[in-house]
Image (cartoon, rainbow, N blue to C red):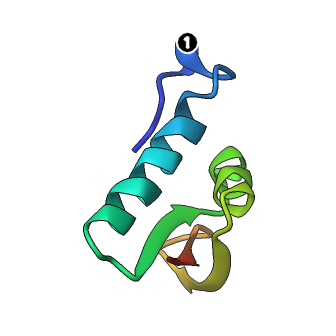
Amino acid sequence: MSVSSRFHRRGIASRLVERLIDHAKRHGLKVIYLHTTQYQTAAIALYKKAGFKFVKDSPLLGPSRILMFKLDL
């Protein structure tokens, strides 16, 4: 999921994450996992601000890594 760069800094991504969390709770989910790369620093900050905790990272091809975040509901 991403927000077009021309709409950055308007709170859209924060609202999307809030809606995701609300939707998951309404449907009885107990946990949400999100994945990103170490290069997506804005996404990482957003996830942490929303209460997600870093779980682990995994290597990709080359220098990239996949980071996993978890939110217990």
Rendering coords of residue 66 (x, y %): 53, 72
Residue at the far top: name it: 6
- Quadrant location, the N terminus: top left
Residue under the point 74% across and 56% down: 49
Looking at the rendered structure, the number of numbered marks drawn on it comes to 1
Rendering coords of residue 23 (x, y %): 33, 56
Rendering coords of residue 4 (x, y %): 47, 22
Query: Is residue 63 or residue 48 the one in the foreground?
Result: 48
- State the image quarter where residue 38 is shown: bottom right
Residue under the point 64% across and 20% down: 10
Residue at the far left: name it: 27
Name the amino acid, label 1: Arg
Up-down: is 24 above or below 65? above
Up-down: is 16 above or below 71? above
Residue position for label 1: 6
- Specify few, some or many for label 1: CA neighbours under 10 Å numbering under 14, 14-19, or 20 or more: few
Q: Give the left or right position of residue 2, taking residue 63 as reference.
A: left
Residue under the point 57% across and 62% down: 37
Q: Give the left or right position of residue 10, taking residue 60 as reference.
A: right
Rendering coords of residue 31 (x, y %): 43, 80
Residue under the point 56% across and 20% down: 5
The kind of secondary structure element at disc 1 is: helix
Q: Give the left or right position of residue 22, taking residue 53 as reference.
A: left
Query: Is residue 68 or residue 31 the one in the foreground?
Result: 31
